[in-house]
Image (tube, rainbow, N blue to C red):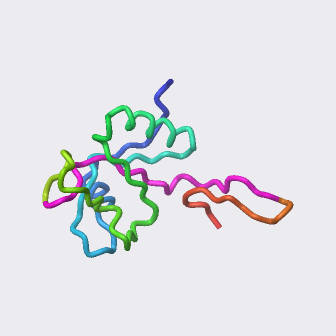
Amino acid sequence: RQLPSLKISTNQYDLDTHGRGESFHPPSPPDAVLYPTSMDDVSFILELCSDTDGLVSVIPYGVGTSLEGHLALLIPDDDPSKINGGRRAGGISLNMSGFDCLGEIEEGDASITSYWNAIH
């Protein structure tokens, strides 16, 4: 498979922004921020990361609220990637801001299956 043309950022501002939400959990910045624009991009990224035996965490990023603390990615005590009091050791953040498709529209029952960041 060919590597998709993805925007990738290691800019410190982007890393800090993608490692902090609105929860009380301390920041936990990723190693890189990737900006997929299609299902093929997402599939490719997840396929690559799955080949690392779970050593690369992948966190989807919408608008950054993360009231539940998922951007901090708290991990179990026995996880080998645990650092800094239980936060993740890097990983990647998938910024879904460029992913603006609706998905499937079911005309018969007027339902819509929405993907991430669908523009309304």
Marks counted in the figure total: 0
Quarter holding the C terminus is: bottom right
The location of residue 2, given as percent across then percent down, is: 49, 25
The location of residue 109, given as percent across then percent down, is: 82, 64
Residue drawn at x 38%, y 69% as measured from the top left: 66
Which quarter of the figure has residue 28?
bottom left
Would you say 56 lies left or right of 60 here? left
Residue drawn at x 38%, y 37% as measured from the top left: 49
Q: Magenta residues?
A: 85-106
Q: Nearer the viewer, residue 78 or 75?
A: 78
Q: Nearer the viewer, residue 5 or 21?
A: 21
In this view, the residue farthest toward the left is 84
In this view, the residue farthest toward the right is 108
The location of residue 6, given as percent across then percent down, is: 45, 39
The location of residue 7, given as percent across then percent down, is: 43, 43
Residue drawn at x 42%, y 50% as measured from the top left: 94
On screen, residue 1 above or below 53: above
On screen, residue 10 above or below 2: below
Q: Nearer the viewer, residue 76 or 23?
A: 76
Would you say 38 lies left or right of 60 here? right
Residue drawn at x 28%, y 62% as measured from the top left: 72
- Asked if residue 21 lies in the magenta stretch, the reply is no
